[in-house]
Amino acid sequence: MLKFVWVVVGNIPSAYIDIQSAPNAYKAVESYIFIMEDWIEHVKNKKSIAECYPVNVEPTPEYAEMLSTRIQIIKDDLLPEIKIALN
């Protein structure tokens, strides 16, 4: 049996998404958004990030805001295009 993962990279924190949780590109990006928004919320609310997906930057409000801006672009611009491509 082949085992695969999605790898999200770019001007954003990298992440691996298992293919069982995300069987297509749309679900992979949705999963990425979910785990990054979890980190953002923990940082903004000054909660521990120990249980969050590891993001390789200091958990500061500035980095959380930068990531939040990028996640919003992904939600607004990339997800709709992936949805169109899959249909």
Image: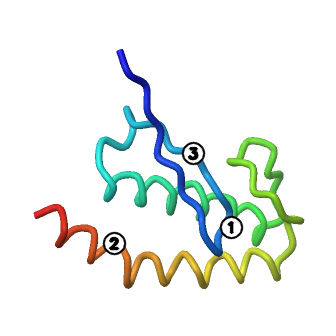
Q: Nearer the viewer, mark 1 or mark 2?
A: 2
Q: Are marks 2 and 3 in contact (CB under 8 Å)?
A: no
The quarter of the picture where residue 13 lies is bottom right
Crowding at dot 1, Cα within 10 Å, few <14 / some 14-19 / many 20+, comes out as many
Number of numbered labels in the structure image: 3
27 left or right of 17 in image: left
- Kind of residue sitting beneath label 2: Leu
Residue at mark 2: 79
Q: Give the CA separation, mark 3 to mark 1.
A: 18 Å
| Residue at figure coordinates x 75%, y 49% from the top left | 54
Residue at mark 1: 40
Residue at mark 3: 16
6 left or right of 66 in image: left
List x then y, in percent, for residue 34.
Answer: 51, 58
| Local secondary structure at mark 1 | helix
| Local secondary structure at mark 2 | helix
List x then y, in percent, for residue 68.
Answer: 62, 78
Q: Give the CA separation, mark 2 to mark 3.
A: 18 Å
List x then y, in percent, for residue 44.
Answer: 76, 72
